[in-house]
Amino acid sequence: MISLAGKAALITGGSRGIGAATVKLFAEAGADVVFSYYSNREAAAVEQEARKRGTRIESCKSDPGKMPDAKKLVEFARERLGRVDILVANAGIWNEREAPIEKLREEDWDEMVRVNLKGVYSVIHYAVPHMIEQQGGRIVAISSTAGQRGEAFHTHYAATKGAIISFVKGLSTELARHNILVNCVAPGWVDTDMSSPVLKTKRGAKAVTASIPLNRVANPSEIAGPILFAASDLATFVTGEVINVNGGSVLCG
């Protein structure tokens, strides 16, 4: 098992899906964790489960797409854990209904960019000064296969996820001199609440699995594993990389 013993981690969007699996896996690896949530419905259960591993687990209601919320979240993590060694920028949204470009509303575009892209920028913006002071840190941002190959009728989602990849590439060189490693994990289809509207239909599930060489979708823990790797001492010479976790559906770097 990879060890994060003695490390303090901040994970956004940690109450469900990939985020919840990452909170639990980090706790199992020995890390103290603060995670943000938008709805309290699932957060308490995740917190209770993760605490069984014996580490400190705290949750904080936050919308990282709002700068004041992001600032308070980072401050909360530092107050509760003493430092932030690892930041996983995971919180995000996806549009269930198809949105052809001629019908894509400005407010829907703006909200996707605010949550998916600004929400990554904001927490990194506030966490990095502390990592510089600590002379090191790990940042893992969550992108998507859509950020590499695009996604018709979900172009605003794909645009934000592609921008995250470019953001990570630039930050990795900018922050390398401070011993801050910045990487990206890009999942394909994952069995989460966000994708369930598609996967719960026979037609949707069939079309999705047909596009994946392994012929199935991932479960959240299969994405949490590579996130853990990127945050661990097994990845001390890895920065600026996109780790694809998609069952072979996007074979690119």
Image (spheres, helix red, strand yellow):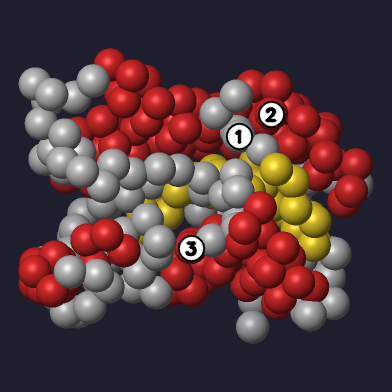
Label 1 sits on residue: 63
Q: Are marks 3 and 2 in contact (CB under 8 Å)?
A: no
Q: Quadrant of the N terminus?
A: bottom right
Horizontal and vertical percent position of residue 239: 50, 47
Q: Secondary structure at mark 3?
A: helix
Question: Which one is in front, 244 or 24?
Answer: 24
Q: Are marks 2 and 1 in contact (CB under 8 Å)?
A: yes
Gap between marks 2 and 1 measured at Cα: 6 Å
Which residue: 85% across, 77% down?
Answer: 54
Question: Closer to the N terminus: mark 3 or mark 2?
Answer: 3
Badge 1 local density, few (<14 within 10 Å), some, or many (20+)?
A: many
Label 2 sits on residue: 69
Q: Which mark is residue 140?
A: none
Which residue: 77% across, 30% down?
Answer: 72
Horizontal and vertical percent position of residue 106: 28, 16
Label 3 sits on residue: 17
Q: Is residue 57 left or right of residue 152?
A: right
Question: Closer to the N terminus: mark 1 or mark 3?
Answer: 3
Amino acid carrying label 1: it is: Asp
Question: Which one is in front, 242 or 122?
Answer: 122
The image quadrant of residue 174 is top right
Badge 2 local density, few (<14 within 10 Å), some, or many (20+)?
A: some
